[in-house]
Amino acid sequence: MRRRILTKRICSLFLALLFIMCVVSLSNAQETIQLWEGKAPGSENWDHKEKASSFPGGGSIVQNVVNPTITAYLPDPSTANGAAVIVCPGGAFRMLSLDGEGKNVATWLNKQGFAAFVLKYRLLKTGDFKNMAPPKVLSEIKLSLTYANANPAPDNHELNNVIRLATSDGQQAIRLVRRNAEKWRIDSSKIGIMGFSAGGGVSVGTALLDDPEGYPDFVVSLYGPSMVDVHVPANAPPLFIAVAANHKPVSMGCVALYSVWNEAGKSAELHVFSEGTGPFGMRSQGLPSDAWPNLFLVWIKGEGLI
């Protein structure tokens, strides 16, 4: 009799544990969604194939994105704060760092209670990553900043077209999340966008276009200056910028972006760290730039968004 009771208790405990595991699994479930019905507008004639590969320093990258998507990372319902962040990885519009500036960021945001959506936006057509010509050293690029536009190749039609398409993908991602706010338990007035490097340019660009449904409620740019002229809109959202001083001329573009936002009387916060190695993302390097995640949390709480 005792053995039978003990067996029942063990079965009940096992089922309870299994239920908890399912709930936790569902709370972090990933769902990948196409941004556009059919072919994305503006690139209907693109016929190149998307490529996924491993980055030499670790992690995965993707190139030649034709069909943009978002991948949802949802927080545990018990800790969710109602806010959502579209995460835009960087890669000079030639690739996307899907782990270091995508999945890892989304996972961290989930732990803070945010719903996160990693955006895979359209890119320039490139060859195999291993055979790509090395990019020009950033410090050798001379920028002439006008209207806080830090585009390194302002006369490159192909690049400018991709910047426009990637930015439209950013706005479509915001629209999609806003339309599904109830499903994902999100406050539709607390949907922001966070970008790294080129993804920062995409993020800023979404706040410069006039479309209420696709407009961000806050913008976070990590070492990502604007790639287009900045004419600060009347309803400009709060802007958070972080960059390393030695990341030139990107840091110059970020300072210029902050200046025009601030001069327009809009909420903006800028952190220029004395040191930070390249695209620091979520990596802890023992450098001043490691502080940006906590500074972001202080900022967004101060803005009353969580």
Image: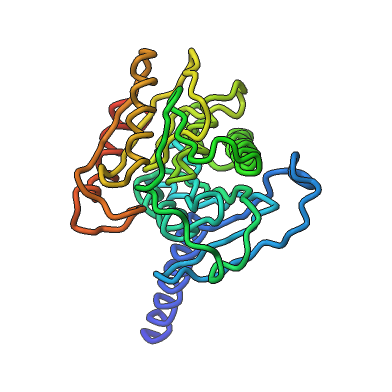
User: In the displayed structure, does residue 270 sit left or right of residue 226?
Assistant: left
Whether 263 is drawn above or below 66: the answer is above
* Residue at x 39% of width, y 69% of height: 57
User: In the displayed structure, does residue 179 sit left or right of residue 90?
Assistant: right
* Residue at x 68% of width, y 49% of height: 34
Residue 39 shows up from this direction: yes
Q: Quadrant of residue 248?
A: top left
Q: Position of residue 97 (x, y in %)?
A: 48, 58
Which residue is more in the foreground, 144 or 258? 144
* Residue at x 47% of width, y 27% of height: 217
Count all numbered tags in the image, as a single digit.
Answer: 0
Location of the N terminus (image quadrant): bottom left
* Residue at x 78% of width, y 47% of height: 39
Which residue is more in the foreground, 263 or 40? 263
Q: Position of residue 146 (x, y in %)?
A: 45, 24
Whether 270 is drawn above or below 111: the answer is above
Whether 184 is drawn above or below 20: the answer is above
Residue 182 shows up from this direction: no
Q: Position of residue 191 (x, y in %)?
A: 49, 33
Location of the C terminus (image quadrant): top left
* Colour convention: rainbow
Q: Quadrant of residue 129?
A: bottom right
Which residue is more in the foreground, 213 or 96? 96
